[in-house]
Image: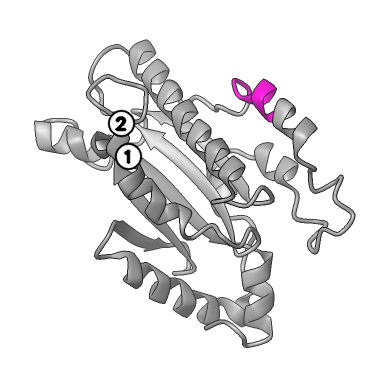
């Protein structure tokens, strides 16, 4: 069973909202209908499909996304999905955590800083993050490990917001996936390593779509 971390993190998010203005509270929000609350109520798959890119600008957005993904390939694993207008950056969790540990290792920033660099404009992307385990241990252990690790990633995001590395207005939707969506069969050590991963889905946000409509994406 996939664990949805929205509820375990609800108190932390409520505390954050008391400090940082939400989109509903921000009168100058340029995209008032682009609400984090809406996406937090969605399951994983619908989140990957929202917001949709209008057919009239799919090609332009896809070209921009492919160019961005290509620029990352030497630094991190990236794949294109949907109508080529969404890309996913994948980091092996072995690059972030020691075996069976739930606290980020000191070297984790090497990879996390790469994806943080794509989040400087809060309206260019909606970001969905998903963390996965292999099938080692009991289902309860895998779910607990997955959730604890995603909490550590969420803490990293909050620290980056506090430091100004990631803007507070960005929409980031987190999911704990456990071992339910393996890339390959968990039948060898190599395959289990491939399945232990953190994914960042970069979905076109309202500003990217707006720029595409105005033919200003570069």
Q: Position of residue 186 (x, y in %)?
A: 18, 31
Identify the element where label 1 is drawn. Answer: helix
Q: Is residue 80 visible?
A: yes
Residue that badge 2 annotates = 105
Identity of the residue drawn at 33% across and 48% down: 111
Location of the N terminus (image quadrant): top left
Identity of the residue drawn at 39% across and 25% down: 146
Q: Is residue 185 visible?
A: no
The furthest residue to the right: 27
Front residue of 116 and 176: 116
Dots 1, 2 in contact, CB < 8 A: yes
Q: Position of residue 123 (x, y in %)?
A: 65, 61
Q: Is residue 76 magenta?
A: no
Q: Residues within 10 Å of mark 2 (few under 14, many from 20)?
A: few
Identify the element where label 2 is drawn. Answer: loop
Q: Give the quadrant of residue 214.
A: bottom right
Q: Specify the segment rendered in magenta.
A: 7-13
The furthest residue to the front: 163
Identity of the residue drawn at 38% across and 55% down: 114
Q: Is residue 176 above or below residue 217?
A: above
Residue that badge 1 annotates = 108
Identity of the residue drawn at 28% across and 65% down: 73
């Amino acid at each position: 069973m996939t664990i949805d971390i929205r509820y375990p993190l609800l108190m932390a998010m409520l505390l954050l909202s008391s400090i940082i203005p939400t989109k509903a509270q921000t009168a100058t929000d340029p995209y008032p209908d682009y609400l984090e609350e809406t996406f937090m109520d969605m399951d994983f798959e619908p989140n990957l499909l929202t917001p949709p890119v209008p057919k009239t600008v799919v090609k332009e957005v896809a070209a921009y996304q492919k160019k961005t993904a290509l620029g990352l390939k030497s630094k991190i694993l990236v794949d294109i999905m949907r109508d080529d207008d969404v890309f996913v950056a994948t980091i092996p969790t072995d690059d972030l955590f020691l075996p069976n540990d739930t606290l980020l290792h000191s070297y984790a920033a090497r990879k996390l800083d790469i994806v943080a660099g794509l989040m400087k404009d809060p309206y260019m992307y909606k970001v969905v993050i998903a963390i996965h385990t292999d099938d080692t241990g009991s289902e309860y252990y895998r779910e607990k490990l997955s959730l604890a690790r995603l909490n550590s990633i969420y803490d990293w995001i909050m620290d980056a917001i506090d430091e100004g590395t990631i803007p507070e207005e960005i929409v980031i939707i987190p999911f704990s996936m456990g071992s339910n969506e393996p890339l390959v069969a968990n039948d060898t050590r190599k395959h289990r390593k491939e399945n232990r991963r953190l994914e960042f889905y970069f979905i076109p946000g309202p500003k990217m779509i707006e720029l595409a409509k105005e033919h200003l994406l570069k």
